[in-house]
Image: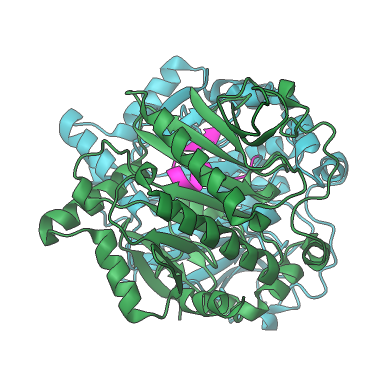
Chain colours: A cyan, B green
Amino acid sequence: MPELRKNVLTDEWVIIATERAKRPQDFQKKRARTIPGEQERVATRPASPPGEAVGAGNCPFCPGNEAMTPPEVFAFREEGTSRDKPGWRVRVVPNKFPAQEIHEVIIETPSHQKSIATLSPSEMEEVILTYQQRYLAAEKNEKIKQITIFRNHGETTGASKLHPHTQLIATPVSSQKFRNQERVAVDYWQKEKKCLYCSLLKEELEKKERIISETQNFVLFAPYASQTPFEVWIFPKRHQPCFANISGEEIKDLSEILPKILFKFYSQLGNPDYNYVIQSYLSSTSHSQAKHWFFQILPRLTPIGGYELGSGIFINIVKPEEAAEFLREVI
Amino acid sequence: MPELRKNVLTDEWVIIATERAKRPQDFQKKRARTIPGEQERVATRPASPPGEAVGAGNCPFCPGNEAMTPPEVFAFREEGTSRDKPGWRVRVVPNKFPAQEIHEVIIETPSHQKSIATLSPSEMEEVILTYQQRYLAAEKNEKIKQITIFRNHGETTGASKLHPHTQLIATPVSSQKFRNQERVAVDYWQKEKKCLYCSLLKEELEKKERIISETQNFVLFAPYASQTPFEVWIFPKRHQPCFANISGEEIKDLSEILPKILFKFYSQLGNPDYNYVIQSYLSSTSHSQAKHWFFQILPRLTPIGGYELGSGIFINIVKPEEAAEFLREVI
């Protein structure tokens, strides 16, 4: 019988209903069988290098097409090159169709074909540094209450451009979800006088069964109440509510882990669509002892249906312990 | 600049960012342009009768294949026919891969080809009566805290079978979303001494701009903070927390409206994927003066991306007032 599990960080329930799927190993096959049009894709994508082999002539994110975007607000560039001209390695522009006043696009690489899963650690480092810089810049606006850095990979997840990019949206309000997570953390701290996130991490490290890997500064694990099959959290060991306070050493570390886990998805699960999100509190947040940022990766191997949207409860057909084992075993 | 709107029933924010889309009239065209593989579908589906023209030989929901499902728990049948044999008009079976102990499939019609949008009012009446019966049956289990009746139409929404069906899942826990909605309603009642839902309905009827249509017992409108383009709520005028207490007259009324609005989606928006959900409190709920059931339809014309999942805030690219106008105008 399926299992009800509670996400301790949000107090939200998830149903783990593994009878619907087979073992993680069968997942790619199952997906090819059940999602129309996916068979070809699963079969052909992993054979070619990751990334999208699509002509870049009209891509506004490609070098040479800088005039197609609003003027850039930040970039890592080759010496001697100028703003809004080629020569950048990472480029940030306001979204042409902003969802909010602060809505930026972080173009992660000049190469249209490249996948973030194949970025070198030094390339990835500049991407993470850019995330940090733009988070700090957004925070300067005193009206801002919530900053979300997120990435959509694949059409089913909202990606309308293939050229690798991440987005940042800052809002003068915070969501119910955000406030709820905050409340849960503060309640725990007031009762236990310790950080809920640090306690969770300690427990996961003791239990081991959901740990995927561990580095000097981070722990990768499949959360107990994973919302989607193969959900992964990258947890900083150092207690820190705000992502933007990430240290240089942590950035280096994260820049090695992140492409590695994304490449695992790519090679072992047939380049699935996924989202990733930096779950962070503002650096000026109150009750900072209670709060802890982390990096959340949500593969989108199964659709979000009426039950999830209507009830608020997600159904996950892969057991997190088995997902962790599977991701741990592959290179 | 995009607009932040708060759903008063949930206290949740939604971003209405219409610069991203054009007018509702352009939506079908836009969709065909931006979602790969959709062009053909939009072009061909509306020409053929609604429903899926797929062979039904192996469909476990088709008459003659009753042995392929768990034994039926309820049915409307022709006189003289027996359980788990053909002759049913609506049939309910436990889900073969249950997500919970109570997880049922309501097969809405024996006809694999038929779409619910083309059911006659008397056929639809038996479907709604079945919803009511199964809701009441699920409520008998005293452990149950939340009952969700929902429908997935189209592959991107979680529908794994094409044969028209609805599902019911009952859980011994209630979600954060559900408890939050409950809390908002009770807070309002304690402050204002009236039902938040009744107040909202009164306001919508006065403003008129989001009303799609009105019948003896129901009001159809596009909610002010619609989560998705063309979201529609069917609100009962009579104050009642629990769907299962729907009257015979209300069932008749709903059975005429529901296929009509679904047919509007089908004919005017190119048979979009959608979910619908009955948002209801148990009939034994406390503070029943504060609570009010309603019927929520969520077309899935745009993907749910990393921002929605990560932040909890939905971005909707069609203005609810324009969606209402568009749906009001079409037959």
Q: Which residues are magenta?
A: A302-315
Q: Is residue B33 above or below residue A283?
A: below
Confirm whether residue A116 shows in the render: yes
- Return the x and y of residue B261 as percentages of the image width and height: 57, 64
Q: In the figure, is residue B111 to the left or right of B262?
A: right
Q: Quadrant of the C terminus of chain B?
A: bottom right
Q: Quadrant of the N terminus of chain B?
A: bottom left
Residue nearest the observer in this picture, A81 or B11? B11
- Return the x and y of residue A28 as percentages of the image width and height: 76, 32
The image shows a total of numbered marks equal to 0
**Is residue A76 in the magenta section?**
no
Task: Identify the residue at horizontal 75%, vertical 69% (top origin).
Answer: B32
Task: Identify the residue at horizontal 54%, vertical 71% (top origin).
Answer: B317
Residue nearest the observer in this picture, B175 or B43? B43
**Is residue A313 in the magenta section?**
yes
Q: Is residue A316 above or below residue B113?
A: above
Q: Residue furthest front?
A: B80
- Return the x and y of residue B100 as percentages of the image width and height: 49, 26
Task: Identify the residue at horizontal 54%, vertical 40% (top origin).
Answer: A253
Residue B65: image quadrant is: top right
Residue nearest the observer in this picture, B195 or A305? B195
Residue B266: image quadrant is: bottom right
Confirm whether residue A82 shows in the render: no
Residue B209: image quadrant is: bottom left
Q: In the figure, is residue A273 to the left or right of B15?
A: right
Q: Is residue A12 above or below residue B216?
A: above
Q: In the figure, is residue A329 to the left or right of B170?
A: right
- Return the x and y of residue A273 as percentages of the image width and height: 68, 47
